[in-house]
Image: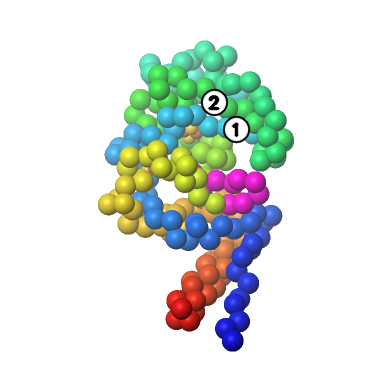
Amino acid sequence: MLVKKETANKVINGLIIDPLIFTQKFVKGCDVCICSGECCYYGVYTDKSEYELIMSKKDRIIKSMDDSQTKNFEDWFEDEQEDSDFPSGIAVGTEVYNGKCVFLDKQGFCTLQKIAIEDGENKWKYKPLYCILFPLVIFEGKLTVDDEHLDRMHYCNKPINQVSTVFEACKNELKHVLGEEGFKELEEYRKEFFEQDEEDNEAA
Ligand code: SF4
Ligand code: SF4
């Protein structure tokens, strides 16, 4: 009898790992010159602590905004709402202005990432976690693929452009959310997952 190894519900760094991240096809890397940063057209939910950090940098952010963005910081965020997928329990959405997140400039760059780079900081210092992660997402405690949002994309969701996988394309993002040790554990789990898949195919 084939003994099926337990690969379901693997938890790393407190997150359930959805094996879809190993198989979901994706582009080799993001290129906003091609996609115009289209994943940012809908805004994003930030944790309250991220919102507060962004607002503490509002004068600096305004300096790097262009004429397609609103410099009126009172128009940057929606009202707070309760959401248990966020560490503080409170989510605050960014507003959409000119058909894109208030922080997206006309070239397709995120102003929050731009100011961090310009000031010699870590590029993700002010960027909300869900922006860093996409096409990954944390949903009800599970690290998975945001297939609903990915389905809306015209570049990175086109099969002809999907020459890689989410796992291969998002190693730095995975290290960011799982840590270096957690990422090593993920690589082991991925190996087990494909070995099991091969065994299942042979047994079929
Ligand atoms: S996730 Fe897709 S739409 Fe967003 S920057 Fe990357 S390639 Fe562009
Ligand atoms: S905060 Fe930046 S990365 Fe996130 S949706 Fe807005 S422009 Fe895009």
Q: Disc 1 marks which residue?
A: 46
Where's residue 174, x and y in %?
54, 54
Q: Position of residue 126 (x, y in %)?
A: 56, 34
Task: Read off the magenta span.
Answer: 134-143
Q: Is mark 1 within 8 Å of ligand 2?
A: yes
Q: Secondary structure at mark 2?
A: strand
Task: For label 2, count other residues whose C-alpha is less than 10 Å away and answer few (under 14), some (14-19) or many (20+).
Answer: many
Q: CA–CA distance between discs 1 and 2?
A: 7 Å
Label 2 sits on residue: 94
Q: Do tag 1 and tag 2 residues touch (Cβ < 8 Å)? A: yes
64 and 173: which is toward the camera: 173
Q: Residue 160: x and y, percent?
A: 27, 52
Counting residues from the N terminus, which is met first, the one under dot 1 or under dot 2? 1
The secondary structure that dominates the magenta segment is: strand
Placement of 120 over or under 141, stated as above or below: above
Disc 2: residue Cβ within 8 A of ligand 2's nearest atom: yes
Instruction: Inspect the magenta stretch and tell me whether residue 70 lies in it.
Output: no
Tell me which amino acid carries mark 2.
Thr
Q: Amino acid at mark 1?
A: Thr
Q: Residues within 10 Å of mark 1 (few under 14, many from 20)?
A: many
Is 109 placed left or right of 190 in the picture? Answer: left
Q: Nearer the viewer, residue 146 or 90?
A: 146
